[in-house]
Amino acid sequence: MPESGPSTPGHIPTERPETAAPASAAPGTPGPGTPGPGTPLPTEPARPGAAPTEPAASGAAARRAGLLVTLVLGGLTALPPLSMDMYLPALPEVTQALHAPAATIQLTLTACLAGMALGQLVVGPMSDKWGRRRPLLIGMLVYIAATAVCALAPSPELLIAFRLLQGLAGAAGIVIARAVVRDLYDGVEMARFFSTLMLISGVAPVVAPLIGGQILRITDWRGVFHALTLVGVLLTLVVWKWLGETLPPAKRHGGGVGAALRTMRGLLADRVFSGYVFAGGLAFAALFAYISASPFVVQEIYGASPQTFSLLFGVNSVGLVAVGQINGKLLVGRVSLDKVLGFGLAVITLAAGALLLMTSGAFGEVGLVPVAAGLFVLMSAMGLALPNTNAQALMRTPHAAGSASALLGTSSFLVGAVASPLVGIAGEATAVPMAVVQLVCALGAVACFLGLCRPWQQRQPRPA
């Protein structure tokens, strides 16, 4: 039986089948094997050869269930940008309220990001051993408590410490959402689903800075963390009620820390998998350099208001979401994922180079509009790079989706945590460090993609 809690109206028991069932057989059907691409949900009719465990649901019910799971997983992947982006407009105010320099306050972003990276290394293997649901709920409860304490922090040191704990706990949503997608989908369908998740989670960076800016109109920066606490409570209730277990006991891995480390070592020994992990991590670091530096670049250097910054941030996020949907709806299944990924990395590199030329004065004094345009192109191209690195890496690791998802997330957040303080190394009066970090990370991503993934070679999925 799945460990999905009590059966309630609307609850989705999303456990995968354990028999060699056709691709669209209903998850929850017992027996050995894995469903093929496009196994969306437990509500599809059972096919011949599958044990009849539940009445077949209508196609409309299957679509409703699929939409609900998409929204739940989208909410989980939206939690990190909510935790980061609602707080961004308040960074200058926090520096004044806690009497700390900008570099110190940027460490609150670094701490949260590092926590999300390290937490995934723990939660990913845990979810392979105990299933997806239990570690996710525990992580969400700790996230709520840590976020509530952040709202009360009297000093930058305490704020940094509990932002670290907030990140450690929030990692559960990131890593388990990706693992659930791998449990339910494969191949092109998985790439499409990641693009759909980008649409859902992309609403968060569009809306979050706008909400953060409006919160600052009526209260101080602590109100942002009160709002995040409420978001955490609501999302936890949704997960508890509607997200079922997707990893059946027969497919879980025993063993402790040693077994988890051996699994991860085996994954990293796969050159192609490692190439996608590092390429995706470095691309994400270029993105996070923008996230970390943009409040100071836009507001302090170019004199924009918090509301203007929020609007520009939202426009850039719309670009990322829109390109992600072009990837999922138009390109996936028609164009090789590697070709799309390579094009996305090339555009990111060109945009980062243009930003470095503009911010270093190569074109003379430039205003906010050209810089904002360069950032928009860079952010939009992430819609081609990030979902495809995830899909390509996870397609090679169906036997350890939790650990593979942990490595994907950890690499991204660790490199991003390193990039975050570097963007402010020359102070608040220049955007050159941001552009340098972005260009170095983009070039590194291209090198990993070409040198390790070698997209021109024919590859077979890694055997379990």
Image (cartoon, helix red, strand yellow):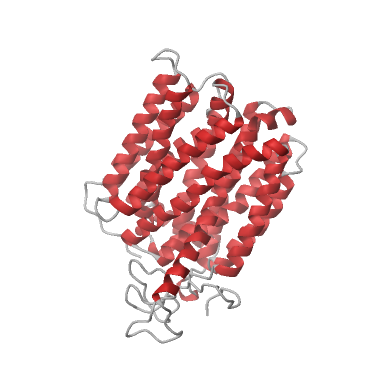
Q: Position of residue 303 (x, y in %)?
A: 57, 22
Q: Is residue 191 above or below residue 1?
A: above
Q: Quadrant of the C terminus?
A: bottom left
User: At 53% from the left edge and 65% from the top edge, which residue is drawn?
Assistant: 132
| Viewer-side residue, 142 vs 335 | 335
User: At 59% from the left edge and 33% from the top edge, which residue is drawn?
Assistant: 307
User: At 64% from the left edge and 27% from the top edge, which residue is drawn?
Assistant: 102
| Viewer-side residue, 66 vs 98 | 66
Q: Position of residue 340 (x, y in %)?
A: 29, 45
Q: Position of residue 434 (x, y in %)?
A: 49, 27
Q: Position of residue 293 (x, y in %)?
A: 54, 30
- Residue 86 visible at all: no
Question: Residue reaching furthest bottom?
Answer: 52
| Viewer-side residue, 328 vs 157 | 328
The number of discs equals 0
Q: Is residue 336 above or below residue 85?
A: below
Q: Is residue 185 above or below residue 249?
A: above
| Residue 308 relative to residue 40: left or right | right
| Residue 430 relative to residue 231: left or right | left
Quarter residue 460 falls in: bottom left
Quarter residue 446 falls in: top left
- Residue 15 visible at all: yes
